[in-house]
Amino acid sequence: MDDFKMTKNGLRDQQNLLKQLNTYLPTLRLKKTLLMVEVNQTTNEIDKLNKEKIKIKTETYDFCSILTSKNSLNPLNFVKIDHVSKSYENIAGVEIPKFERVVFEKEEYFLLDTPIYFDEVILKIMNLISISEKINVENEKKMALMKELKDVSIRVNLFEKILIPRTERNIKKIKIFLSDQELAAVSQAKVAKLKKAANVS
């Protein structure tokens, strides 16, 4: 069922609608492009962080003997997360998380009770945890961006493939109808004029 009127007012309404759609579409396209760039950059950042994580993990495993030794303190018992600090920023209209740092609980131990490289192991474990949390935040960011990108892509397709073509068809249909009405009116006027002329003679 048509949701527009086959009148001059109906034509004006459809023309105004088309103008609005064509005005808003470039904004949607720009937002889609910005989101695609952000998703790609975030994906590259995650890949980079994963490579860095592998490197740190390998370095940490070099101290594996300390972690498994029965005669020494386990460094894992001295590394506990208090919280992950995040901030939020707006990108292309989306609130996304930004990693700040991992805050660790302060665990005390006596230096004399630990091997000389115990502090270094603790630091490497903290670095490993920090980069893992950073990757988690980047993945959270990517998911938020991809969700918005999907929504915007749906809207762009709606405009390009449904709303604008349908409005253009409506305008064409109304114009044809009004033109036919005008021709019919002219024809009726001519017929009336001929009848009137015939009656006078």
Image: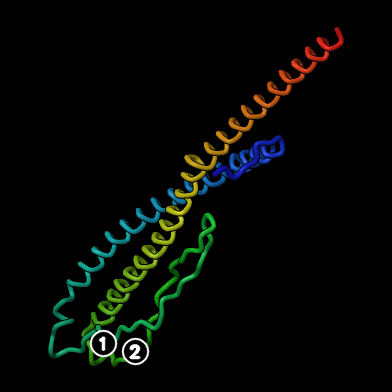
Where disc 2 sits, the SS reads: loop
Q: Is residue 100 left or right of residue 49?
A: right
Residue positioned 73% across, 20% down in the render: 188
- Whole-number angstrom distance, CA of label 2 to CA of label 1: 9 Å
Q: Find disc 1 in the rendering and name its residue.
A: 77
| Relative to 64, 184 lies left or right | right
State the image coordinates of residue 84 (x, y, percent, origin top left): 41, 76
Which residue corresponds to mark 2?
107
In the depicted view, which residue is nearer to us: 67 or 85? 85
- Crowding at dot 1, Cα within 10 Å, few <14 / some 14-19 / many 20+, comes out as few
Quadrant of the snapshot with the N terminus: top right
Residue displayed at 35% across by 55% down: 43
Q: Dot 1: what SS? A: helix
Q: Residues within 10 Å of mark 2 (few under 14, many from 20)?
A: few
- Identify the image quadrant of residue 56: bottom left
Image coords of residue 69 (percent x, y): 13, 85
Q: Nearer the viewer, residue 15 or 89?
A: 15
